[in-house]
Amino acid sequence: MTADELDELDSYADDLLDYRADLIAENETALGAEEGERIAWGQMLEDGVISPTVQKMWVAQDGACPVCEELDGQIVALDELFQAEDDEYDAPPEPHVYCRCSTTLVNEGEE
């Protein structure tokens, strides 16, 4: 290998490490935000700010993956998991990294 080829490989390896660091940071941030939302909803329920009949709904973003598309619009109780064909999830970004879907609160019977 030439020195230029080694430099190119070195640069590519650095790019991959930067990409991995960004991937981990974004995913961990999304997990933390979702956990904070879950805690807030639980506290709101406990404090009587929201009704015990309030549920959560999965909201898939445009271009969502097949798993998220399957979960889109599914409504479950705050303490229940969303059911996909092959697995169950508490909330995004659980199905995969870079998941941009979300959950929202809905009143029972609302969509």
Image: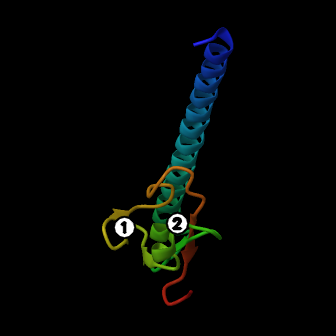
Label 2: which secondary element: loop
For the C terminus, which image quadrant?
A: bottom right
Examine the rendering and report whether any part of residue 48 can be seen: yes
Residue at coordinates 36% horizontally, 67% vertically from top-left? 81
Residue beneath the point at 47% across and 54% down:
96
Give the crowd class for mark 1: few <14, some 14-19, many >=20 residues within 10 Å: some
User: Could you tell me how far apart the alpha carbons at marks 1 and 2 are, in whole angstroms?
Assistant: 19 Å
Q: Which mark is residue 59?
A: none
Location of mark 2 (residue): 65
SS under mark 1:
loop
Q: Residue furthest right?
A: 4
The answer to whether 3 is drawn above or below residue 81 in the figure is above
Answer with the quarter of the image where residue 87 lies: bottom left
Q: Position of residue 77 (x, y in %)?
A: 41, 74
Residue placed most toward the observer, 75 or 68: 68
Residue 90 point in image, percent of width and height? 41, 61
Q: Is residue 87 above or below residue 13?
A: below
Give the residue pinned by disc 1.
81
User: At which x and y percent is residue 44?
Assistant: 53, 63
